[in-house]
Amino acid sequence: MALAQLTVVLDGTIVNIALPQAQIALGMSDGDRTWVVTLYSLVFGALLLLGGRIADFWGRKRSFIVGMAGFAIASAIGGAAQNTGELLAARGLQGLFAALLAPASLALLTVNFPGGKDRIKAFALYGAIAGGGAAVGLILGGVLTEYASWRWCLFVNVPIAIVAIAAALPVIRESKAHGNTRYDVPGAILVAFGLGSLVFGFAQAENGWGSWPVLVCLPLGLVLLALFVFVESRSNHPLLPLRIIVDKVRGGAFLTALLSGAALLGGLLFLTLYFQIVLGYTPIQSGLASLPMTATIMIGAGVLSKFLASTGVRIPMTVGPIVGAAGLLWLTGITVGGNYALEVLPGLILLGAGLALIFVPLQNVALSGIAEHDAGAASAAVTAMQQIGGSLGTALFTALYTAAVSSYLVGTVPSPAAQFGALVSGYQSAFLWAAIIIFAAAPIAFFLVRPRREDLLGTEPAAHLG
């Protein structure tokens, strides 16, 4: 299950490292290059809730294995692509199978670890990968691109999938929802087009918030999602039972997932640009420079999981956004000269510590008190919030970055020094707003995230996986 989460999270960043070489090899235009990233996010985000319900009704283990196998096959097709069309088709297929795989893996975690300290440890590992996997993707992408080929940034999913499936077949027990298992077709159509419109609108915002895809898709997405809520409130077999999202504790966790996902992707994107464009790092050097954040998340997850049962989740989920914001604020002090040890490293460690405090308990809180019948739907809702948050963060921070760069260059004499100064000004602006956004999660967690101890720990001993 952890390998499945790693695969899905890795793919969000590892392909970004491969894109420049892929563009040259396949003769892609800049527009096609953007679609390589956007198409995956679009299909993934649009089909997540449907994928969650399919996992509930069809069988979570079966959905996990099919999703993992399909993702690997799509990755192999993308790695072997000989033209742009083949690569784009493969990315769409990856998004489709990821929409089945991600909620199935998290739902399996929920039902296979229904209670006890093992549940906290399982969610801690899953949360650590959710927070640190993106940075791992930068490192692995840099290594593969520099020493092998951009194609291996896609091929690498195949051996991971083989190991995950080989382990899943004998170890994970099947589970599925019983009772009313009819599909909510109107709800599935509305939410797919609604989420798809939002993801696409945010992805196109880097071309300007006044462009027609933004002006059309964002309002359309909101209207379709409002209609989806209306339909779900009147359906006797809803795709997403509203009881999942209206619960105060779970709603607070969903909002925290949205804000922290936006800040994480915003921070990583512009930090990578700073390393490679301003400091002149190679892809692998850029990935290694991000390693302290990942290491801090992994170490923090191990430590926090041992104390979470006694401390509860409210304190870490309140302190985490504050510490993460402090790390992003530290990064606003970067300069063109770039002293890594003083200007970057402390910020990365603080950001990693903050993300560990958020992500380790987050998945557990978001799924606390969920009936087994709704495990897939609730898991899909958590992942959808993170996906929307990532799309929103990338679009918002790109627009703020562009505005800061333009403002810096007004009235300056064109020169390389001025250009680098403008870029750093843009990165500083992105880090500042990312800090503000993640900090906003602190009061949300403090006032809303108060789960009952029995919901957090569960009331049954952890089930045997065999």
Image (cartoon, grey):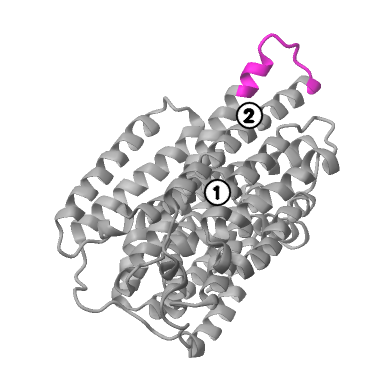
Q: Position of residue 375 (x, y in %)?
A: 36, 69
Q: Secondary structure at mark 1?
A: helix
The answer to which image quadrant residue 134 occupies is bottom right
The answer to which image quadrant residue 176 occupies is bottom left
Which residue corresponds to mark 2?
429
Which label lies toward us, 2 or 1? 1
- Amino acid type, callout 1: Thr
Within 10 angstroms of label 1, few (less than 14), some, or many (20 or more) residues?
A: many
Question: Does 238 sit left or right of 351 as displayed?
Answer: left
The reply to whether dot 2 and dot 1 touch (C-beta < 8 Å) is no
Q: Position of residue 90 (x, y in %)?
A: 48, 60
Within 10 angstroms of label 2, few (less than 14), some, or many (20 or more) residues?
A: many
Q: Secondary structure at mark 2?
A: helix
- Give the vertical position of 447 relative to 460 (above or below): above
Question: Does 11 sit left or right of 201 as displayed?
Answer: right
Q: Position of residue 363 (x, y in %)?
A: 48, 62
Of label 2 and label 1, which has the lower sequence position? 1
How far apart marks 2 and 1 lie (CA) works out to: 24 Å
Which residue corresponds to mark 1?
318
Query: Which of the numbered marks, if any, corresponds to residue 330?
Result: none
- Give the vertical position of 195 relative to 119 (above or below): above
Point 77% across, 45% down: residue: 346
Instruction: Give the residue furthest to the top.
Output: 411
- The answer to if 410 sits in the magenta stretch is yes
